[in-house]
Structures are given as structure tokens and as C-alpha cells.
Amino acid sequence: MRLQFIASEVWQGLRRNATMAIAVVIVTFVSLAFLGSAALLQMQVTNLKNDWLNKVEVSIFLCPDVSSVANCASGPVTKSQQDAIERVLTTGAVSKIVKSVYYESKQEAYNNLVERDPDGVFSQHLTADAMQPSLRVKLKDPEQFQVVADATEKLEGVEYVKDQRDVFKTLFQVLNRATLIAAALAAVMLLAAVLLITTTIRLSALSRRRETTIMRMVGSSKTLIQLPFMLEGAIAATLGAVLSILGLWLTVRYLIEDWLSTQFNWIDYIRASDVFVVAPWMLLIAVVLSAIASLVTLGRYTSA
């Protein structure tokens, strides 16, 4: 009987304030969609970092025929200089963090350029003799670049040392800032959702002020009086959360998995299953926010 009464009160409240309830659903949907997008974007950034940082190398460019660097004063790198550099990497103090060392000749450097430049924008103006030999060093931990640079950049035969992570640094900064922007928009929208939930519950409580007064007079508990109002906010917020989860799943499933991954298949994309990792948190946030808004509002409008 009590459950039937609560269900009836909830339905009446939602029906009376249908417009505000729909507004709560929409605002919650948008705010949690931003929040979920921020979480998924950060997951994508993490995937990219894990994938690309494991592939980057430290490039130790050896002295070419002409260079103004002091290490190259004696001319192009000699075989003995190259062997000395390789010994530092394979048997020296930094050998523990070095995974592999590969020598790239001028011809190999030119072949790689041609492969990356099929239209000949750059390669047609160059020859193999114009290229520069290098040592490609893969590290066990890409974050240890500076250790290798400090150990090799002053050696005879080394013109300069380049960290390939610099290529991705700007990209990661842009993606991280996009995550922060999405999170900031989500925070603003969540605040709007809380205010709307508060307004909806307040209007519902005011419209049933006489009923709640009678219930208090006949000895109804505070929980029984407040529960229908709390459920109204929780249902609207939860429905908005469910819609945002569905929207994110459809976006990842069809936009990213079915289309984007086929266009750029060299990127490790997030999957639709990742949406279900953040979904419980989105539902929890929706319920918690509605509960907080309800308690703050009901403490004033359903009290004696």
C-alpha cells in the first residue's frame, strides 16, 4: 500500500511538472555527455601515449660532411667514432635503459624519405649523399631520453640528439586541453542540472504543500513525505544519464569504430565497450546530484 502510494505520488509529480522534468532530462543528458566525452577523450589520449611512446626512438644524428658543431670539427663521423658511440649505448652506463640500437645509413635514410614522400615533394630534390647517418635508439622507458642525451651528445662524431617524443608533444597538449574544456563545460552543465532539479522539486513541493501538511498532521514519517519528491528528481536525472550513455555508445560504435578506424587505421582507438567503463560513474553522479539537490530543497519546503 505504501509503495503504491509513493509510486502514485511520483507519477503525479512528474505529470504536473512535465516541462521542468523534461528540462532536467535534457540538461542532465547534455552535461553527462560532456563529462563522459571528457573521460573517453582522456582514455583515448592514454591509449595514444601508450601506443606511440612505445614506438618512438632517440635519434642520434652523426656528423655529416659539413657541420658547424664542435663535435664534428674533424669532419664526417668515422668508423671508430661510431663504434665508440655504440659502446656507450650497448655496454656503458646507459645500456640498462637501452632496448636496441640500429644504425641507419645515408642510403637507408634516403629510402625511408622516399617511402614517406610518395609524391616526391622533398625526395626529388635530394640524393642519398645529402642525407645524414644516424643511430636509432629504442629505450625501455621513453621517459629516460635525457639520460641517453647527456651520455652521447658531447661525444666526437655526434652532431645532435633528437627525441621523437617532441613530434607528439603538441598533439598530446591539444588533446589534454580539449579534455579540460569538455570537463569544464560538463561542470557548468551539471550545475545547471542541479539548479533545474532543485527548481522542479521546489515547484512539486509547493504544489502539494497542503498534502504534505496533512501527512505530517496524521503522523507520516519525514522519509515517507520526502521520498516521492526525491524519486522524481532521481528518475529524471537517471533518464538523462541513460540517454547520454546511449548517445556516447552510438557515437563510439558507429562514428569511431565503423568509420574513423577505417579511415585512419594506424591509431589505437577507444571502443564501444569503453563507454561501459564510465557509464556506472555517470549514473552514480546523476543520482548523487539529484539526491543533494533534493535534500537541500526538501529540508525547506517539506518541513513544518
Image (cartoon, grey):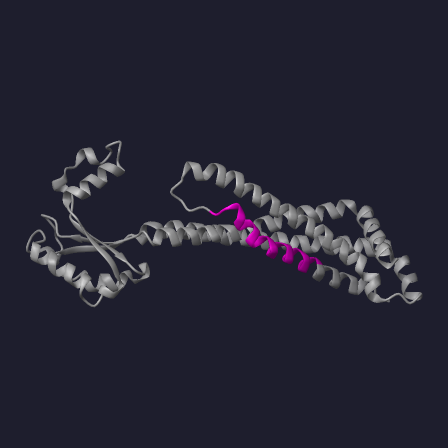
Quarter holding the C terminus is bottom right
Quarter holding the N terminus is bottom right
Relative image position of residue 7 (x, y in whole percent): 82, 53
Relative image position of residue 246 (x, y in whole percent): 61, 44
- Please identify the quarter of the rendering in which residue 119 is found: top left
- Asked if residue 260 lies left or right of residue 125, the reply is right
Relative image position of residue 295 (x, y in whole percent): 74, 63
Residue toward you, 17 or 228: 228
Q: Tell me if residue 223 comes above or below residue 267 in the rendering.
A: below
Give the main secondary structure of the magenta stretch: helix
Q: Is residue 258 magenta?
A: no
- Asked if residue 27 lies left or right of residue 127, the reply is right
Relative image position of residue 241 (x, y in whole percent): 65, 50
Q: Tell me if residue 111 comes above or below residue 36 in the rendering.
A: above
Which residue does the image show at 67% across and 53% down from the upper left?
193
Name the outermost residue toward the top.
119
Name the outermost residue toward the left.
74
- Asked if residue 210 lies left or right of residue 147, the reply is right
Q: Is residue 282 magenta?
A: yes
Which residue does the image show at 14% across and 37% down from the upper left?
127
- Bounds of the magenta segment: 270-290
Residue 156 in sight here: no
- Asked if residue 65 lies left or right of residue 19, the reply is left
Residue toward you, 195 or 123: 123
Residue 193 in sight here: yes
